[in-house]
Amino acid sequence: MFKHGKKDVQKTLFDQDQSFPGYVMDMLQKSWAYDFYRFIFSQINEERFSVLYSDKASRPNKPVNVLVGLLILKMEHALSDEELIGSLYFDYRYQYALGLDANDNDDRLCVNTLSNFRARLVEYELQTGESLFQQEMEDLAENMAVYLGLNKSKARMDSSLINSSCKNITYRTHLYCHSQYGKRDNK
């Protein structure tokens, strides 16, 4: 059964960050977590993912915005699932970025929750040919481009994706040449 996650999290007197000194709160608000919450997490379209869940009365899903946010953070910080869950529980910035309250046990997640969500995404894509995650990433990128006022008619050629692909090709070419021709003599 699909249920929406929390969009705008109202802070209470008992939230962990309420006890932080002012300079620590300033650090938190200048960190990636604040921007992630504001520009990414709060913009995630959970309704898009409702097709992954049954209409029948059953145990409700974990918040989709949290799951999608975790997958983005996993990619951004190059973490394994176990490292990601560890960061979620032990690094307050992750909880802040995902609008989670450290005292709320309803939003507790485990590695299997992430695996099951990814499996649902893959199964849906195999059945329909639609990648819901890719659609969401494209919409988030579009929202960010509008917010930043980017001119999308011009494309950068120094993309890290292109750069890393070039490095891969160079490395594979280097290995191939050495395996085919051996080391060159320096005469």
Image (cartoon, rainbow, N blue to C red):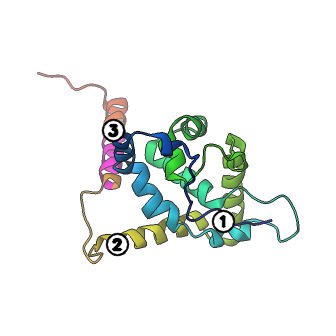
Secondary structure beneath dot 3 equals helix
Q: Position of residue 174 (x, y in %)?
A: 31, 36
Alpha carbons under labels 3 and 2: distance apart: 38 Å
Q: Residue at x 54, y 70 (%)?
A: 135
Alpha carbons under labels 1 and 2: distance apart: 30 Å
Residue under label 3, please give it: 171
Residue under label 1, please give it: 125
Residue stretch rendered in magenta on the structure? 162-172
Q: Residue 183 occupies which quadrant of the picture?
A: top left
Q: Amino acid at mark 3?
A: Tyr
Q: Residue 168 occupies which quadrant of the picture?
A: top left
The mark that comes first in sequence, 1 or 3, is 1
Q: Residue at x 40, y 39 (%)?
A: 21
Residues at marks 1 and 2 touching, judged by CB atoms closer than 8 Å: no
Residue under label 2, please give it: 147
Quadrant assignment for the C terminus = top left
